[in-house]
Image: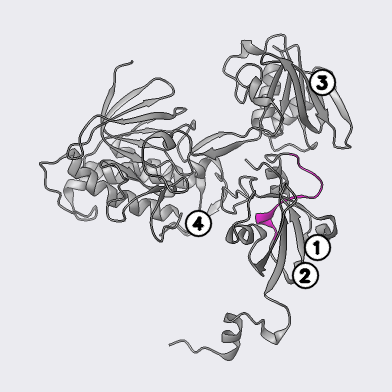
Amino acid sequence: MVKTSLHDTATRYGAEPGGGAPTKVTITFVDSQGQARAVEGEVGSTVMETARRNDIPEIAAECGGACACATCHVYVDDKWTEKTGKASQMEEDMLDFAFDVKPNSRLCCQITVKPELDGLVVRTPAQQG
Amino acid sequence: MSQAIETDVVIVGAGPAGLFAVFELGLLDIKAHVVDILPRAGGQCSELYPEKPIYDIPGIPICTGQELTDDLLKQIAPFNPTFHFNEMVETLTSIGTSEKPAFRLTTDAGKVFESRVVFIAAGGGSFQPKKPPIPGIEAYEGKSVFYAVRRVEDFRDKNVVIVGGGDSALDWTLNLQPVARKVTLVHRRADFRAAPHSVNAMNELQAAGKIDFKLGQITKVAGVDGELSAATLKGNDGTEEQLPCERLMPFFGLTMKLGPVANWGLNLHENLIPVDTEKFETSHPGIFAVGDINSYPGKLKLILSGFHEGALAAQKAHRYVYPEKKLLFQYTTSSTNLQKKLGVS
């Protein structure tokens, strides 16, 4: 029998130990037609998973998050590029398979949701695959 | 129509689910032909992530997509399946009855199969080249826009523009340079994923003025009756430039499209094939669907699910292929009969 501490219980129900950082953030996806959809993202998951869970259009994510297909391409809003960071070498290589790649292009399976990304805005391209 | 290849089962798709189905069917003496649009076995494992680790194959703590594919090929070797690569099954028609099913399948390469049962293990569908969002490009496809080189002669003395930074783009830049009037390579950055020796060779050709390399992307094309005359290059700085272009080859990798499966008269649900969870049979008796392409309540798109599905589907397939034989359930560990089939007894 595993003893469950209060600490574990708190974590399970969504409160961070110490009651500090939030576990949910808001992420806004703006599609190629300009329509914005604000959804809740869970800290620790990825922006791609958040999109899939919320049926966000224009995110194909064919490979399911292995950074192997370039069909979860997004443009990170300029205000957020510093916080999301830059693409890794592997991700840059994969971005070669995306269309209309810009300096703020990312594959959103490679962006982990963090408390400081609360309010993140990304735009999706018209064509992924 | 060419002579039909007669077999017990045609497996559509040579990914892990299709390969392991060869094993489970083979143990039951069901001979397989396997058709795949890709040039090699492995499906998504070898096409999307050959070098990336997989952690959730039971009993194998870690392996790459390629290692799993290689091991599956080794595992099924005793059953000697016949592979038909670079081919897509286009049509599937029933030539039997629901009690005694039989099927005819044709491929885009003109092959005809006649089988007792069919296993669809087509994953996310067929891998097809990604088509860049250049307005009006469809009108040129197959005439002056190509996603693969079928005949080098089509490029002789032409102004060729190749887009991309991987092995396909670099290989064709190098191979077409001596044939074409001029080759211009266009890529979004000065880094290339391609093999270093290809990149070096390309750099040397560029230094010698034998090819052009441009940073940016192709945004527009112009021409008449399917024949290109020019392409617009948008540089990374936003400036536009007209390139003489009679042949355009965009290399943006592959994407999965459901493809002809949609036309086989099977029930589909959101591009997946609903099956039962006892036999993994589709709405049509004798046609089974295993792996990522099927759907049922609780379905998980895991390789291990595809393995399980193939094992169960094979049991029912045996009843169609050998209606007179009673199937005895046996273990490979203890059955000398099965071990003989595996070539280990």
Same chain? Circles 4 and 2? no
Label 4–label 1 contact, CB within 8 A: no
Same chain? Circles 3 and 4? yes
Same chain? Circles 1 and 3? no
The label nearer to you, 3 versus 4, is 3
Residue highlighted by disc 1: A83
Residue B86: mark in rendering: none
Q: Chain of mark 2?
A: A
Q: Which of the two discs, 3 and 4, labels the residue nearer the N terminus?
A: 4
Q: For marks 2 and 1, give the CA distance.
A: 7 Å
Label 1–label 3 contact, CB within 8 A: no
**Percent position (x, y) of residue B190?**
80, 36
Given residues B44 and B200, the one toward you in this image is: B44
Given residues B27 and B135, the one toward you in this image is: B135
Q: For marks 4 and 2, give the CA distance.
A: 33 Å
Mark 3 surroundings: few (<14), some (14-19) or many (≥20) residues within 10 A: some
Q: Magenta segment range?
A: A100-111
Which amino acid is tagged 1? Lys
**Percent position (x, y) of residue B2?**
33, 16
Q: For marks 3 and 2, give the CA distance.
A: 45 Å
Which amino acid is tagged 4? Ile
Residue highlighted by disc 4: B62
Query: From the image, which quarter does the C terminus of chain B lie in?
Result: top left
SS of the residue at dot 4?
loop
Label 3–label 4 contact, CB within 8 A: no
SS of the residue at dot 3?
strand
Residue highlighted by disc 3: B243
Which amino acid is tagged 2? Glu
Mark 1 surroundings: few (<14), some (14-19) or many (≥20) residues within 10 A: few
Identify the residue at horizontal 27%, vertical 55% (top origin).
Answer: B278
Residue A116: mark in rendering: 2
Query: From the image, which quarter does the N terminus of chain B lie in?
Result: top left
